[in-house]
Image (cartoon, rainbow, N blue to C red):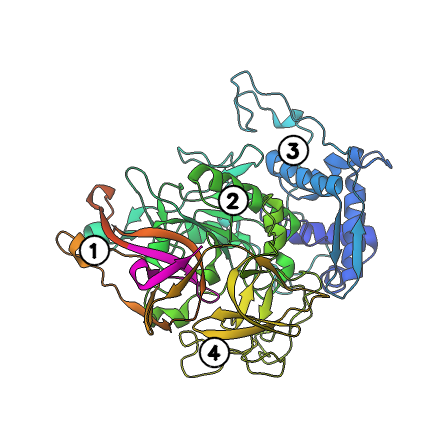
């Protein structure tokens, strides 16, 4: 797409105007008309190809330039991802219902990367690097004025001022380097860490540095609900929140902000902050087209690398969406975030990590796994000005849950998300949804419908054998020993484990479960608490308890029960 082939490094209207001239289309039409956009994008790509050729391998430099990146490594990274898709082939269904297939080109390989510098540094900013000798450094990717370009007032792009543009690897002045696999070219864009205000050691932001080793159990997937161009100013604000990485939509470019050994403020639940890595993805929950193939591939490589480094299981009990993180207290549940939402393709994401969701015909659980392209549920709320209007049809990773085995039956209720009120079909409301990759205990079957235990109730979803939306699965379950078993949003130690102040109460959430119900067991932990709240990490305190918790898939979000309150079924 012509508009998507630009970057925060160059003014988007520059390529829009050029694509418009080449295709004979005004920029406004490129934005609004998909056919015109494709024509413009194709014309722009063709203009970058110096020598016409039927061999896809000869187009590597043109594809790299099409990325719009002035950083040679970012351009190569984009081209590498495009060539990977061409090499593997792909089949997708468009938003308007057409099947599109790209046949694989198995032998397609990108050209060899430049040789390492004399110092062994293969970075584009090494001492021996000369941008004039690099065929992938595009000096002409500068903003240019044009009579056909739209004015700033007319443009849909939020073009940042020059001093708001993100740092490139060459511009980074921090004494750190990004933690990434060798297959990714990542940028170090450091988050703020400084004092402010009059609170001395307690007025600081926007993350916590940690001395020694940090236990990391989760990776949390977010979306930014905004454009990449705003990331530098947000992450550089000590009074704002923080996260470890951001991945750009158009080309999968990765920027790291907080070292993984440190605690970023991203999950809305301190227990999860202390034990997780947060990754933001440029895009919007209600606009699934922002989740591009380049983004999925970069993110999958990064998550696989981090999971291997920290021993994090590659499953949906540990690779969480922000919408799967529980509220820390009952009061916090209703306000928890919903990203990345139902349009995030979890099945494809895990396939890219070489951990596809597989079933087992003998299990007493199910893994939710609808066909993303064929599964097009009814949602509302995508247009903020008309929240009751149906969203455009789009592939989705979630299934709706009903009180009875009928599509006319009400949706199941969520006492935490909507106290005393029904669930809704809003794209932002996950209270009656199960998501791809999540494992639930089977609570019944009737015809084409399957019931699961969900938030203390039976929840039914359509699961016909002709087009299944879940697969049988094995795995441990827990069942409560008594009625009214409490559920928690954080796995904190018992009171006696604390020495001094700062005791965190074991406050249950508003949900209760009882005998006869079963929930999938995602892991077992001993209660712990990392007490920060001070600029100097030497003043932080680690509290280790003895109470044991089981993590369960209670609803759309994971939660905890104390091990003494349940029986494990293997």
> In the rendering, which numbered label is found on residue 33?
none
Are the residues flagged by discs 1 and 3 in contact, CB closer than 8 Å? Answer: no
Numbered disc 1: secondary structure: loop
If you read the primary sequence from the N terminus, does the residue marked by circle 3 or circle 4 appear first? Answer: 3
If you read the primary sequence from the N terminus, does the residue marked by circle 4 or circle 2 appear first? Answer: 2
If you read the primary sequence from the N terminus, does the residue marked by circle 2 or circle 3 appear first? Answer: 3
> In the rendering, which numbered label is found on residue 303?
2
Numbered disc 2: secondary structure: helix
If you read the primary sequence from the N terminus, does the residue marked by circle 1 or circle 2 appear first? Answer: 1
3D distance between C-alphas at marks 3 and 4: 55 Å
Residue segment shown in magenta? 548-570
Q: Where is residue 140 shown, x and y percent of the image?
A: 68, 39
Mark 2 burial class by Cα count in 10 Å: few <14, some 14-19, many 20+: many
Q: Which residue is mark 3?
A: 137
> In the rendering, which numbered label is found on residue 413?
4
Are the residues flagged by discs 4 and 1 in contact, CB closer than 8 Å? Answer: no
Dominant secondary structure of the magenta stretch?
Answer: strand
Q: Where is residue 89 shown, x and y percent of the image?
A: 76, 45
For the residues carrying marks 4 and 2, which lies nearer the camera in this image? Answer: 4
Numbered disc 4: secondary structure: loop
Q: Which residue is mark 1?
A: 198
Mark 1 burial class by Cα count in 10 Å: few <14, some 14-19, many 20+: few
Q: Where is residue 515 shown, x and y percent of the image?
A: 38, 71
Give the total number of marks visible in the rendering: 4
3D distance between C-alphas at marks 2 and 3: 29 Å
3D distance between C-alphas at marks 4 and 1: 45 Å
Taking depth in this image into account, of 360 and 350 the one nearest to the observer is 360
Residue for point 58% across, 60% down: 436
Residue for point 67% across, 66% down: 375
């Amino acid at each position: 797409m012509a508009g998507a082939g630009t970057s925060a490094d160059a003014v988007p209207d520059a390529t829009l105007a050029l694509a418009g001239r080449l295709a004979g289309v005004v920029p406004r039409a490129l934005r609004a008309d998909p056919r015109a956009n494709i024509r413009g994008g194709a014309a722009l790509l063709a203009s970058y190809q110096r020598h016409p050729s039927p061999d896809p391998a000869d187009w590597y430099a043109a594809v790299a330039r099409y990325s719009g990146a002035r950083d040679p490594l970012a351009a190569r990274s984009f081209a590498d991802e495009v060539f990977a898709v061409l090499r593997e082939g792909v089949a997708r269904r468009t938003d308007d219902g057409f099947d599109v297939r790209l046949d694989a080109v198995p032998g397609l390989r990108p050209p060899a990367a430049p040789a390492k510098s004399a110092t062994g540094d293969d970075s584009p900013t090494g001492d021996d690097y000369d941008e004039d000798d690099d065929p992938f450094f595009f000096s002409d990717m500068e903003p240019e004025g044009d009579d056909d370009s739209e004015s700033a007032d007319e443009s849909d792009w939020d073009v940042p001022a020059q001093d708001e543009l993100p740092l490139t690897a060459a511009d980074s002045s921090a004494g750190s380097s990004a933690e990434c696999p060798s297959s990714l070219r990542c940028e170090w864009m450091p988050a703020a860490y400084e004092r402010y205000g009059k609170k001395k050691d307690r007025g600081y932001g926007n993350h916590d540095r940690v001395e020694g080793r940090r236990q990391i159990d989760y990776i949390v997937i977010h979306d930014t609900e905004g454009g990449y161009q705003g990331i530098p100013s947000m992450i550089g604000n000590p009074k704002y929140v923080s996260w470890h990485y951001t991945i750009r939509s158009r080309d999968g470019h990765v920027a790291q902000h907080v070292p993984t050994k440190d605690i970023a403020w991203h999950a809305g639940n301190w227990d999860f902050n202390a034990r997780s890595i947060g990754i933001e993805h440029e895009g919007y929950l209600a606009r699934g087209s922002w989740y591009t193939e380049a983004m999925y591939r970069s993110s999958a490589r990064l998550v696989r690398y981090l999971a291997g480094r920290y021993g994090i299981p590659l499953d949906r009990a540990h690779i969480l969406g922000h919408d799967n993180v529980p509220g820390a207290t009952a009061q916090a549940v209703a306000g928890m975030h919903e990203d990345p939402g139902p349009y995030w393709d979890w099945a494809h994401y895990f396939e890219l990590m070489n951990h596809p969701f597989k079933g087992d015909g003998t299990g007493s659980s199910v893994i939710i796994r609808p066909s993303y392209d064929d599964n097009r549920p009814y949602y509302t709320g995508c247009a903020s000005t008309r929240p009751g209007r149906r969203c455009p049809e789009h592939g989705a990773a979630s299934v709706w849950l009903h009180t009875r085995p009928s599509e006319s039956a009400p949706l199941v209720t969520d006492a935490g998300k909507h106290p005393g009120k029904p669930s809704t079909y809003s794209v932002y409301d996950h209270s009656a949804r199960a998501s791809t990759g999540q494992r639930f205990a089977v609570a019944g079957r009737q015809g084409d419908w399957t019931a699961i235990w969900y938030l203390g109730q039976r929840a039914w979803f359509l699961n016909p054998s002709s087009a299944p939306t879940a697969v049988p699965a094995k795995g441990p379950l827990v069942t409560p020993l008594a009625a009214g078993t409490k559920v928690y949003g954080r796995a904190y130690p018992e009171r006696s484990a604390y020495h001094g102040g700062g005791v965190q109460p074991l406050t249950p959430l508003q949900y209760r479960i009882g005998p006869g119900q079963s929930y999938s067991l995602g892991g077992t932990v001993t209660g712990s608490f990392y007490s920060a709240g001070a600029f100097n990490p030497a003043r932080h305190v680690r509290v280790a308890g003895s109470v044991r918790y089981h993590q369960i898939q209670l609803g759309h979000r994971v939660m905890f029960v104390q091990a003494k309150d349940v029986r494990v079924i293997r």
